[in-house]
Image (cartoon, rainbow, N blue to C red):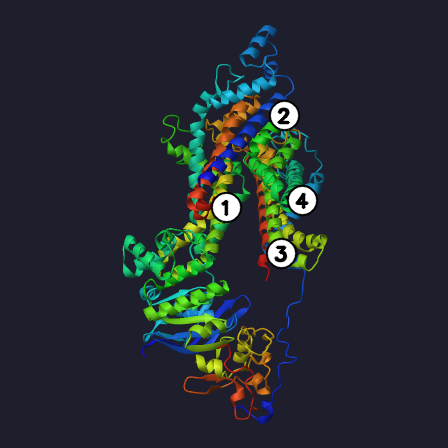
Amino acid sequence: MTRYLLRRIGYMVLTMWVIITATFFLMNTLPGDPIRNKAKQLPPQIQQNLRKRYGLDKPVHIRYLIYLKNLLHGDLGESIEFPGETANNIIKEKFPASARLGLQAVFFGLIIGLILGILAAFYKNTWIDYLVIFIALVGVSVPSFVVAALIQKYLAGGFFPIVGWPSENVWFSGWRYTVLPTFALSLGSIAIYSRYMKSSVLDVINQDYIMTARAKGVPNVQIVWKHILRNAILPIITILGPQIAGIITGTFVIERIFAIPGLGEYYVASINARDYTMIMATTVFFAFLFILSLLIVDILYGVIDPRIRVTGEKR
Amino acid sequence: MLELNKEKFQILGCEGQNADAIMRPNITYWQDAWRRLKMNKVAMFSMYLLLVIILMCIVGPYLRPYGFEEQFIELANTPPTKEHWFGLDQLGRDIFVRLWKGGRVSIAIGLIATFICTVVGALYGGISGYLGGLVDDVMMRIVEVIVGIPYLIVVILISIVFEKGLFSLILALVLTGWTGIARIVRGQILQLKESEYVLAAQALGADPARIIIKHLIPNTIGIIIVYMSLNIPSYIFAEAFLSFIGLGVQPPNTSWGAMAAFGQQNMDFYPYQLIFPAAAISLTMLAFNLLGDGLRDALDPRLRQ
Amino acid sequence: MERLLEVRNLRVSYHTYAGEVQSVRGVSFTLDKGESLAIVGESGCGKTVTSKAIMGLIQTPPGEIKKGSEILFQGKNILEFSKKEWQQYRGAEVSMIFQDPMTSLNPTMKVGLQIAESLMIHRGMSKKEAFKEAVKMLEMVNIPNAESRANQYPHQFSGGMRQRAMIAIALACNPKILIADEPTTALDVTIQAQIIDLMKELQKKLGTSIILITHDLGVVADIAQKLIVMYAGQIVERGNAEELFYNPQHPYTWALLRAVPRLDSEKKEDLISIQGTPPDLIAPPKGCPFASRCQYRMQICDEVPPPVTKISETHEAACWLHHEYAPKVDIPVGRGGVL
């Protein structure tokens, strides 16, 4: 297990480094430098000072090393668009809203998806099954921004507000504001999980060891809990990673539609404003988040599946 | 009462009894797959629906006498009428014409990106699995690194370096999308290399070309086709998503995602401006997904009966 | 002798898209305390379905136990059991081990816990007690280092060890009947012998009755006192081991015996395989089901199902060759069969 873990972390570091390096050099191959684009009208002397301030007067490889060093210290740089504003501050300010939205969507999607999948498997070919199939089809076919827009149009003025986000105590207050965005963001995951869970449960039900359990006289409820579900959930964990990635990207759209002051919305805005340091900072941050969630999923899988726990190899 | 006369008690033996008779006609893999697909009504309906959508994308823009950029400012935001079947958007452009014009872009991106990913991925995975050993190790390590990179970031970086638009979009989708098929193809080839019937074929002296044609390709191509059919909608989805946040197709060109983004701004007053492109995306996604499911059922040799 | 189990006219069908498959078509037999019975036949002959019916493991749908079937356990018809009675019966009174030890253990549960589970259910033991008992069970089935093995998962066991663990699970509550469905088929030959020896030893020690399901007469010879030969969902011959091996009376039994390799034979005999495949049980043949593969087929065989002929008090065969009109045929198997 330790070896397995170390190997995963090794990959994580390597992938991070590839992303950071690629991001850095791609940004630096851009024609002209960011200062000239932003500050054309300023006198050359001030431009020169600005250049110095952002370290742009040094050769590329030196800047790369400085950038890496700063990153290691957790310093993501300073905005060009708004001098004085550091990326760290902006992330600290904007990220909690995104994180809450994302986490809620991940858990809501997972729980509802699993329950629907299990129900559909145990009530196969009944109306419950057909309802789940229908939800799954809608979930994979209708983009989240469409769902979000429809929600806004038709649920406006209802019990749940269609715009805004709790501004104080970002983690726990104002849950009413979070209901609709969370639902819109998680619909796709619900569809995928319910579908996978259903086929996984059906697969496990037909395994010999379920027959063994029956032959032992294990009561039905226990067979479902201890033998079927635990084994059926395993393959689901492998799709958790990509699903979480989907949720992270999904926040970009949902934040925009529901006017949530999150990091995704800010990221899109800084891309459109071509604020290079902020693009780099948020890119690196999102990549880190993404890779970290993949790593957590991997570890989770190792903890739950004894076959990996010991050998350190996937089947 | 039954008659038990002595003549019936003569030993005849089992010659000519043909207890082994094979009742079913011998049909090839592809005939069988096609037969199964045809039996799947949902998949067949999806296929016809897709054909209709693709056909409309080809001829649709010529069905009405308007250009897709042509503006009728005074008619802006007119709901569907006899002249403008799907209404006009806020710049007074005919939505019917734009829908099929945009569909070309959406579907083309899905098809092109999938095609390139499949070729690249299948070659990469094939080489990796076929050579094995250290080469395989290194090639798969590279894949593992790439899998960790979120595609959105690649899209963003590429669209900043190059121009935003079709080319960046496809390039970014391809750069991150080929790894899935590469892993699948490699897994298949490794499995086949070990499988007893390939060993048997080798032992019988079949030459490699025959093994590849008779065993490797039929066993791999089914999975590749299924994977492709499920990948196309995910790329269409990605395009819509990126165009929606302004990173995809740029004006004057349009796509379903871009139209939906444009329509969303006007959602409260003119919902039809969102409904039409959203319905087009959803129906296409639905049809591709259902067809993909049908293909999987039809092409998976292990489900063959 | 105490009568434990009596199966009367058991008929089981499976409903498939192609129609109703009549897997078991009127099977009757009895099992006494401490007795071991072998049910022999090729795959698809209904032997596994019979054993699942005794265990109450036929899924309905698609399976269906036909009206008029009776399975009496200690005089009580199990087909009329309540849910609670079923639970007390399975695992405690009758238990079962399956063909493939690779797939019949839960991969995500510790082996010790899988044994302990039935002790907790049937004996009401605490988890700790049951686990201790499970370790003892593992020792009994000759697994070394039982204590640490009990804390491992099935994938850390070899095939033979898994089957031993399965036996430990099955015997944990000291059931009266153990059904073993092809328990050695998936194992290496050397390990097969070990498993059979273990079952024999445990039977002696615990007095369990065994129903052994197999297609391999070589395995049967070692352990069974009573044999049933099944073909196409019916019993074609039954008798004690001596009768069936030394004086087989059905062409299908002859064919089975000739298909077993013999190491001790002085003559060089060819292994003879049985030509053809069993009939389709969606539309079973009108006459004798084996007729189309039988060297001794007569016209009557195609038309009328053969009656059961009593050869001795314990020995019966269903074949037209025993009719008074039929020509006399020499038994084509070297006397002694595989013994």
Q: Chain ID for label 1? A: A
Q: Are marks 4 and 3 on the same chain?
A: yes
Task: For mark 2, give the secondary structure.
Answer: helix
Q: Are marks 4 and 2 on the same chain?
A: yes
Residue kind at label 1, given as amino acid type: Lys
How crowded pointer 4 is (Cα within 10 Å; few <14, some 14-19, many 20+) is rated as some
| Quadrant placement of the C terminus of chain B | bottom right
Q: Chain ID for label 4? A: B
Which residue is depicted at the point 29% across and 52% down?
A: C128
Residue kind at label 3, given as amino acid type: Leu
Which residue is depicted at the point 50% across and 39% down?
A: A147
How many marks can you see?
4
Residue kind at label 2, given as amino acid type: Val
Measure the alpha-carbon separation of dots 1 and 2.
38 Å
Task: For mark 4, give the secondary structure.
Answer: helix
Q: Which residue is mark 4?
A: B54
Q: Are marks 1 and 3 on the same chain?
A: no
* Vertical order, C158 against B174 (above or below): below
> Mark 1 near mark 3, Cβ–Cβ under 8 Å?
no
- Label 4 vs 2, first from the N-terminus: 4
Mark drawn on residue B161: 2
List x then y, in percent, for residue B27: 67, 62
Measure the alpha-carbon separation of dots 1 and 3.
34 Å
Measure the alpha-carbon separation of dots 1 and 4.
42 Å
> Mark 4 near mark 2, Cβ–Cβ under 8 Å?
no
Q: Are marks 2 and 3 on the same chain?
A: yes
- Label 4 vs 3, first from the N-terminus: 3
Q: Which residue is mark 3?
A: B37
Q: Are marks 1 and 2 on the same chain?
A: no
Q: Which residue is mark 1?
A: A314
